[in-house]
Image: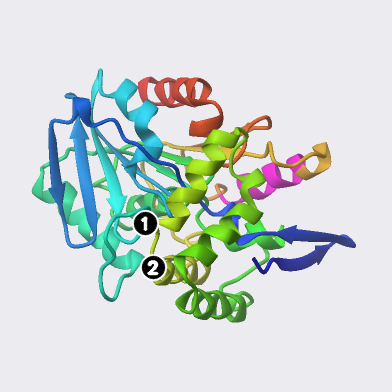
């Protein structure tokens, strides 16, 4: 995989695109109460109570939330989303994340979900920020697991980055994925797998999810993330926000501190926002440490 190489304070950073989310599989459907489809995502619903929407990340499906969804379903009605083109969910023509947002709004409205809490991982976290800032009266509490209002600073290590400064990289990535095979996407995933999760079993499942994803959909999604900066919009969010960051893939304390500052800066304009950094686990905290993550989620939802 081609890494983006950038410098800051005379240090070279090699940040693989795979810091964006990929996912692993095998959702337990034993507790399933219903399934539904829109044109651009599938939904699995379990449990009863106040609604929660779970949104996975890039090359992920709802299975990434398996343990979390099952536990939350004791007190909540959990809606697990699987986006078209990721992890074996069939792709659609002319895919865009804007359509995903619009159909999520329609889904919430048509199913009369009253201020659902939204929990998103990586790309799913971005989608949570997009929903909560564009329809602030519709969304309840928001939890983003290692997902930001603007993804580019993950690569550049500075919030000075703009859509304009990243335009050429975004277009390059989009074009690159249009010409890739699923096998090549999986091979790229394997190159950066140490960033994603700790255990070999989880890493192999992540690679399999990448293999089952549609390369063009992946490229369009990365392009959208790099071409849409929500930092000026998130001030519209009315509900409480929790950002849970993962910096366990960084070996130096100074790097972890830099990531924490970068994340915190992206929350500055949100009235009710807090940040928790996990310095032990990696991007897929729900795979590395689901018990810890569930506690943070429950504490925030109940608080």
The chief SS type of the magenta part is helix
Mark 1 burial class by Cα count in 10 Å: few <14, some 14-19, many 20+: many
Name the residue at the right extreme.
10
Mark number, residue 217: 2
Question: Is residue 260 shown in magenta?
Answer: yes
Of 46 and 53, which appears nearest the observer? 46
Question: Residue 51: where, in percent of width, then height?
Answer: 22, 33
In this picture, residue 265 sits left or right of residue 44: right
Q: Which residues are magenta?
A: 256-266
Q: Position of residue 113 (x, y in %)?
A: 16, 40
Q: Position of residue 68 (x, y in %)?
A: 38, 28
- On the image, the x and y values in percent for residue 61 come to 35, 47
Which of the 4 image quarters holds residue 163? bottom right
Q: Which residue is mark 1?
A: 86
Q: Is residue 22 visible?
A: no
Alpha-carbon neighbours of circle 2 within 10 Å: few (<14), some, or many (≥20)? many
Residue displayed at 48% across by 79% down: 179
């Amino acid at each position: 995989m081609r890494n983006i190489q950038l410098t800051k304070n005379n240090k070279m950073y090699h940040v693989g695109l795979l810091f964006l989310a990929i996912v692993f599989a095998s959702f337990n459907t034993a507790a399933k109460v219903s399934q539904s489809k829109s044109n651009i995502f599938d939904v699995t619903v379990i449990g009863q109570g106040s609604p929660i929407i779970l949104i996975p990340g890039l090359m992920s499906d709802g299975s990434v939330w398996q343990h979390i969804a099952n536990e939350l379903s004791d007190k909540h009605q959990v809606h697990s989303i699987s986006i078209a083109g990721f992890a074996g969910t069939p792709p659609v023509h002319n895919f865009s994340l804007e359509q995903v947002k619009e159909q999520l709004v329609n889904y919430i409205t048509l199913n009369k979900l009253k201020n659902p809490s939204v929990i998103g991982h990586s790309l799913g976290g971005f989608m949570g920020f997009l929903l909560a800032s564009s329809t602030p009266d519709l969304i309840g509490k928001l939890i983003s697991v290692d997902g930001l209002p603007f993804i580019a600073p993950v690569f550049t290590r500075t919030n000075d980055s703009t859509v304009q400064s990243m335009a050429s990289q975004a277009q390059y990535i989009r074009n690159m994925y249009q010409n890739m095979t699923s096998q090549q996407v999986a091979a790229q995933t394997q190159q950066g797998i140490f960033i994603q999760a700790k255990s070999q079993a989880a890493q192999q499942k992540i690679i399999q999810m990448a293999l089952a994803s549609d390369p063009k959909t992946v490229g369009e999604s990365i392009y959208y993330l790099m071409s849409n900066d929500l930092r000026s919009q998130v001030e519209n969010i009315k509900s409480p926000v929790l950002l849970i960051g993962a910096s366990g893939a960084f070996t130096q304390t100074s790097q972890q501190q830099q990531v924490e500052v970068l994340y915190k800066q992206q929350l500055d304009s949100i009235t009710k926002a807090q940040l928790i950094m996990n310095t032990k686990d990696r991007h897929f905290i729900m795979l590395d440490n689901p018990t810890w993550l569930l506690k943070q989620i429950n504490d925030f939802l109940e608080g």
